[in-house]
Amino acid sequence: VGVSTDIRVVLSDRREFSAHVVLSDAESDLAILKIDDVEGLSFLPLRDSDEVEVGELALAIGNPFGVGQTVSSGIVSGLARSGGMNGDGQGYFIQTDAPINPGNSGGALIDMQGALMGINTSILTRSGGSNGIGFAIPANLISAFLEQARAGADRFVRPWAGMSGQPVGADMAAPLGLDRPGGIIVSGMHRASPFAAAGLAVGDVITAVNGKEVHTPAEMIYRMSVTGLGREAVVTRLRDGVSAQLSVALIAAPEEPAREALVLDDRSLLPGLALARINPAVLQELGLPLEVEGVAITDNGPFGMRIGLQRGDVILVVNGSEVQSPSDVREHLTRAHQVSMIVQRGVQRLSFQFRP
């Protein structure tokens, strides 16, 4: 991922200022910038984006195609959108039909009172132009970004659920005691999950977080994120037709056991290969299934890339021996003249053989 070394902020009155990144997050494609050596700039108040309603008038501000600052108008056409072509993308967005084109990303989506509802981030298009389906990051999530930035963080940390789940469809609703489809059925749970500590288990249905209905895992993580790390969320659970409310601690993914991160040096057959022992934090960073254990590749390096290894691969066996830690892998790759390796990639087990 490239890192900007020179950031210029250009105002509508053509003044320019230097700025630097305070906090960034690649997953949401959002960063907090601090403008250097300036005071007295006006700002937009943040709207409670949970109060935004479908049908509200909205203005999208941006610099489409580099023509200069432009304002387009429309309405809020949807809420709780994933932003994906098939509805399965990551995130939680406000949808608007205000024309948004390339160059609008990072611009404000404001209401008729001038309050910030969200920040424009993407469009749904097949041609590259606006088709009236644009997405904005809600203001409440932006507020959570600002809170962590003010606390000194340089990257956004989402609360860790430590569980997996899937939306409850029409065919599952009645057997689970629901009068209509909705909620998330818990399909997996990590032993260190704060949800498990609160009393939830596989087979439970999560219907709401802090009184707000959730229907996808992305919605649930969004609700946890806007509540904030270090706090508690009230989760509504349905089990055997009985509803209950449980308090769940919102924590960062634990670094236990220690990841023991290392990068193989020139004495190894694969110099530059970066490894880590899998723990909840590594699971979250790499998007690995909750049940995975062992040693993960966090960077395949130039030589790992040549033989087909990828970031997120889990190394299971090297030269016939199971490996439990990054140092185990280093030992095998340092002393061997040729290597056979078995890795887990998703649901596949792949075998690699190579020699210098």
Image (cartoon, helix red, strand yellow):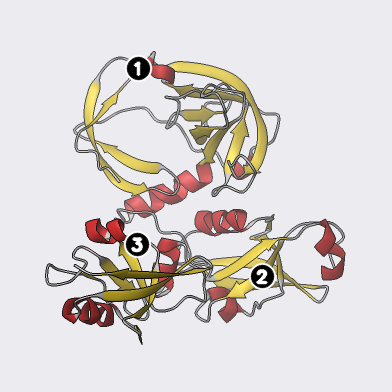
Mark 2 = which residue? 186
Q: Which residue is drawn at 42% across and 42% down?
A: 29
Quadrant (top left/top right/bottom left/bottom right) for the C terminus: bottom left
> Does residue 253 appear in the picture of this structure?
no
Q: How crowded is mark 2: few (under 14 residues within 10 Å), some or many (20 or more)?
A: many
Q: Are marks 1 and 2 in contact (CB under 8 Å)?
A: no
- Foreground mark, 1 or 3, reads 3
Q: Distance between the residues labelled 2 and 3?
A: 32 Å
Q: What element carries label 2?
A: strand
Callout count: 3
Q: Distance between the residues labelled 1 and 3?
A: 48 Å
User: Residue 44, how many percent across, how many down?
Assistant: 44, 31
User: Residue 287, how many percent across, how many down?
Assistant: 47, 62
Q: Which residue is drawn at 41% across and 18% down?
A: 65
Q: Specify the quadrant of the image occupied by residue 10.
A: top left
Of the two numbered discs 2 and 3 on the same chain, state the one appearing first in sequence. Answer: 2
Q: Do the residues labelled 1 and 3 touch (CB within 8 Å)?
A: no
For badge 2, the amino acid type reads: Val
Q: In this view, does 320 lie above or below 106?
A: below
User: Residue 96, how many percent across, how many down?
Assistant: 61, 30
For badge 3, the amino acid type reads: Leu
Question: Mark on residue 12?
Answer: 1
Of the two numbered discs 1 and 2 on the same chain, state the one appearing first in sequence. Answer: 1
Q: Is mark 1 on a helix, strand or loop?
A: loop
User: Residue 112, how many percent across, how many down?
Assistant: 59, 24
Mark 3 = which residue? 309
- Foreground mark, 2 or 3, reads 3
- Foreground mark, 1 or 2, reads 2
Q: Is residue 319 above or below residue 312?
A: below
Which sits in the foreground, 354 or 295? 354
